[in-house]
């Protein structure tokens, strides 16, 4: 039963999108539509697609009505719902055409590459990778520099949300290995990006916290011409990247090199500075303040006995190690938690003396928030994962009690256990000390600073918040995205100009030619990998554990990218191909209705080189052209069909036909084409003439 309330909250859908989805579904369900009606269905779907892309016109509506009535003659059950919608939702159709207006907001959306959309910093991933593939490392680094000051660090430690959204997951089952491409670009670039600085604005900004959010905001604000100073209470710059991420994952010298880029923009970094009051910089004459202090303290386990000296916060431990305090632990260490920080703690424990390291987690391996590759690395070093247990009490004799967690399938029947460990680490999250905000208008909630989600402005005018302290514990790349937003908001606030938040949206940073690759490789599930040092030796060393990724291997991996920046996945080409009856292009629907080529080999046998696809493609992602005596069909750089051009012995025009077509011509029209090969037009004309001749002769007898 539908209640009034549920009617109100139900998500609005677009009737035009609904129709398109239904038509596509029927076309993609194998065996659903008889071959003879597929072209007519594809024609209707193609016209509807044009409308959803904002390429519709009044002529399109007329063409659509005609296409629907043609389809109605052979498949009324498919044509009728479209015809009904054209009548019932006429206004919506007209709005789509006249003003690119979709009341549900599902049409006319920008179609950036899914990886770029998923990246919180919106790095132009396809262009960056294509540059790596071409060996243009400096250009690749310039693309990165437009969206992050920390490309090398991201290339080493980012959990790569971009890879989760990569369309190769749907095509081959293995995302393009995007993360280390940034590291290759940073490592191999001969020329560092030339960062331009605007004229000085005379405005002075204080940033509290020298982690990824603070460094990013400083990087952009300095380029906008502001004077920027960062204040941090630690001895060294880098925040979580220096004190919370082990050296074996992010070596100090690499981080220092990236911080130097920010300093070269004129940003001053004051270390060992404890901020006492949120307003102190405004009171000292700074024009704005950004609070980007991160979450530096480990959360306690919250069970009786968690305050004993052998129960240590995971982040405190990592920080002590990176500060050079060399804390020794073990021999038996238990880490409670299942995130990336817990993994870092477990692996660092081996390097600090532990011989037996266990991670006790309340769910199972699949449900761990840690990056699966990081989990593999930890297990390879000998970390034991103990699933479905939650701690309940820690005794002074270092005994820790666990109960079966409620997520365990046998939670009700398994009794509690008690184990002994020399050190117990809490790896369940971080928090910040916010007591110094008391007496200001800045509110806090759940341990974070409350700020406007768009402007990041706090309750205190001129004070903004960014990074983990604003959005909660997250990744370095999320902090970079937040730092970019903070910089835009602060600039707008200081200069009295509207904030250009559109500039933070995914953007193409370069026009990079396609990489050429074989059809098989484009859909290959073989994803490249990076070798790490041997687990049996690396587990005792803080040295960088990853071997350098060979740039040639990176280039081959870059070829697996399907260039979703250029092929926007509209599916028009596939529909046009079905319409002409060739059925050479095969696409699969991915998230958000994006179509993607699922095989690059079928065109070799089925493409007839007619060019219908290229004539409808809005971006030039698919090309059919004559080159050096061949008609070539190319999809985002991969030649999928190459057919020698024939010269018509009648009209002299070059033409291309599929092998099957040529054979048919020879078989059926063989007698009439003894003198050579005819192009389809001449063959048809010759056939008609011959027919007339036969009819005339028949009349004579
Ligand atoms: S195929 Fe390339 S452009 Fe498309 S989502 Fe994957 S990495 Fe991004
Ligand atoms: S090749 Fe062109 S027509 Fe085909 S899906 Fe990509 S952008 Fe659309």
Image: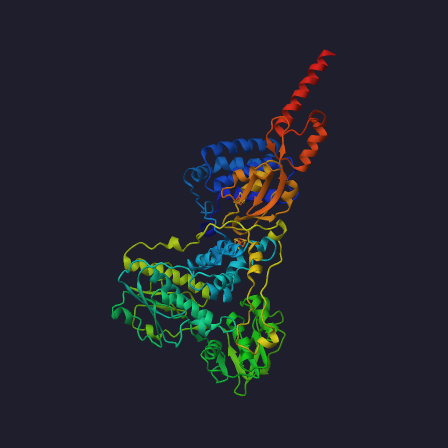
Q: Is residue 581 left or right of residue 444?
A: right
**Closer-to-camera residue (136/527):** 136
Q: Is residue 460 visible?
A: no
**Closer-to-camera residue (343/262):** 262
Asked if residue 55 is positioned above or below residue 547 in the image, the reply reads above
Q: Residue furthest bottom?
A: 397
Q: Which quadrant does the C terminus fall into?
A: top right
Q: Can residue 616 be seen in this view?
A: yes
Place of residue 99 in the rendered image (x, y in percent of width and height, measured from the top left) = 41, 40
Display colour scheme: rainbow
Place of residue 150 in the rendered image (x, y in percent of width and height, measured from the top left) = 44, 64
Q: Quadrant of residue 695?
A: top right
**Closer-to-camera residue (110/430):** 110
Q: Image point 45% across, 74% down: which residue?
A: 243
Q: Image point 49% across, 53% down: which residue?
A: 127
Q: In this view, does 590 lie to the left or right of 202?
A: right
């Amino acid at each position: 039963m539908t209640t009034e309330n549920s009617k109100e909250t139900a998500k609005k859908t677009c009737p035009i999108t609904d129709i398109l989805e239904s038509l596509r579904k029927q076309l993609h369900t194998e065996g659903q539509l008889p071959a003879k009606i597929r072209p007519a269905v594809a024609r209707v779907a193609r016209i509807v697609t044009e409308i959803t892309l904002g390429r519709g016109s009044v002529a399109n509506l007329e063409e659509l009505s005609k296409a629907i009535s043609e389809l109605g003659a052979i498949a009324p059950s498919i044509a009728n719902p479209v015809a009904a919608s054209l009548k019932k939702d006429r206004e919506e159709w007209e709005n789509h055409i006249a003003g690119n207006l979709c009341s549900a907001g599902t049409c006319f959306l920008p179609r950036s590459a899914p990886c770029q959309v998923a990246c919180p910093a919106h790095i132009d991933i396809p262009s960056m990778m294509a540059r790596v593939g071409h060996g243009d490392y400096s250009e690749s680094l310039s693309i990165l520099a437009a969206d992050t000051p920390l490309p090398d660090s991201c290339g080493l430690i980012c959990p790569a949300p971009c890879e989760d959204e990569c369309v190769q997951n749907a095509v081959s089952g293995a995302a393009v290995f995007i993360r280390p491409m940034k590291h290759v670009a940073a490592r191999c670039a001969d020329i560092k990006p030339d960062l331009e600085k605007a004229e000085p604005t005379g405005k002075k900004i204080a940033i509290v916290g020298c982690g990824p959010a603070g460094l990013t905001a400083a990087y952009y604000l300095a380029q906008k011409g502001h004077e920027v100073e960062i204040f941090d209470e630690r001895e060294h710059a880098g925040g979580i990247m220096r004190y919370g991420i082990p050296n074996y994952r992010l070596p100090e010298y690499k981080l220092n090199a990236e911080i130097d880029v920010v300093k070269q923009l004129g940003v001053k970094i004051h270390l060992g500075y404890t901020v006492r009051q949120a307003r102190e910089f405004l009171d000292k004459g700074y024009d704005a303040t950004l609070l980007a202090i991160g979450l530096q303290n480990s959360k306690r386990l919250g069970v009786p006995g968690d305050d004993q000296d052998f129960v240590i916060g995971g982040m405190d431990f990592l920080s002590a190690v990176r500060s050079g305090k060399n804390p020794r632990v073990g021999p038996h260490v238990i880490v409670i938690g299942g995130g990336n920080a817990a993994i870092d703690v477990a692996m660092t424990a081996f390097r600090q003396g532990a011989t037996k390291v266990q991670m006790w987690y309340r769910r199972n391996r699949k449900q761990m928030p840690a990056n699966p590759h990081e989990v593999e690395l930890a297990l390879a070093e000998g970390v034991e994962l103990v699933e479905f247990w939650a701690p309940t009490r820690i005794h002074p004799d270092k005994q820790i009690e666990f109960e079966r967690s409620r997520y365990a399938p046998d939670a009700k029947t398994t009794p509690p256990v008690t184990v002994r460990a020399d050190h117990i680490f809490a790896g369940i999250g971080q928090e910040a000390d916010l007591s110094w905000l008391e007496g200001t208008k800045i509110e806090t909630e759940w341990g974070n600073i409350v700020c406007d989600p768009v402007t990041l402005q706090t309750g205190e005018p001129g004070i903004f918040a960014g990074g983990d302290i604003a959005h909660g514990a997250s990744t370095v790349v999320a902090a970079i995205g937040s730092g970019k937003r903070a910089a835009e908001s602060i600039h707008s606030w200081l200069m009295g100009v509207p904030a250009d938040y559109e500039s933070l949206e995914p953007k193409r940073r370069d026009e990079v030619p396609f990489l050429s690759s074989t059809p098989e490789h484009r859909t290959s599930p073989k994803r490249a990998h990076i070798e790490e040092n041997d687990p049996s030796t690396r587990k005792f060393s803080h040295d960088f554990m990853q071997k350098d990724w060979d740039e040639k291997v990176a280039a081959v991996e870059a070829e697996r990218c399907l260039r979703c920046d250029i092929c926007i996945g509209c599916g028009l080409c596939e529909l046009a191909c079905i319409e002409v009856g060739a059925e050479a292009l095969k696409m699969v629907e991915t998230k958000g209705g994006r179509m993607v080529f699922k095989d690059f080999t079928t065109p070799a046998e089925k493409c007839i080189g007619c060019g219908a696809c290229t004539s409808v493609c809005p971006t030039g992602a698919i090309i059919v052209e004559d080159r050096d005596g061949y008609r070539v069909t190319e999809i985002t750089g991969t030649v999928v069909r190459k057919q020698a051009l024939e010269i018509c012995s009648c009209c002299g025009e070059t033409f291309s036909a599929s092998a099957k077509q040529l054979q048919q011509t020879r078989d059926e029209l063989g007698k009439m084409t003894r003198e050579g090969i005819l192009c389809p037009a001449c063959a048809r004309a010759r056939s008609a003439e011959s027919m007339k001749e036969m009819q005339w002769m028949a009349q004579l007898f």
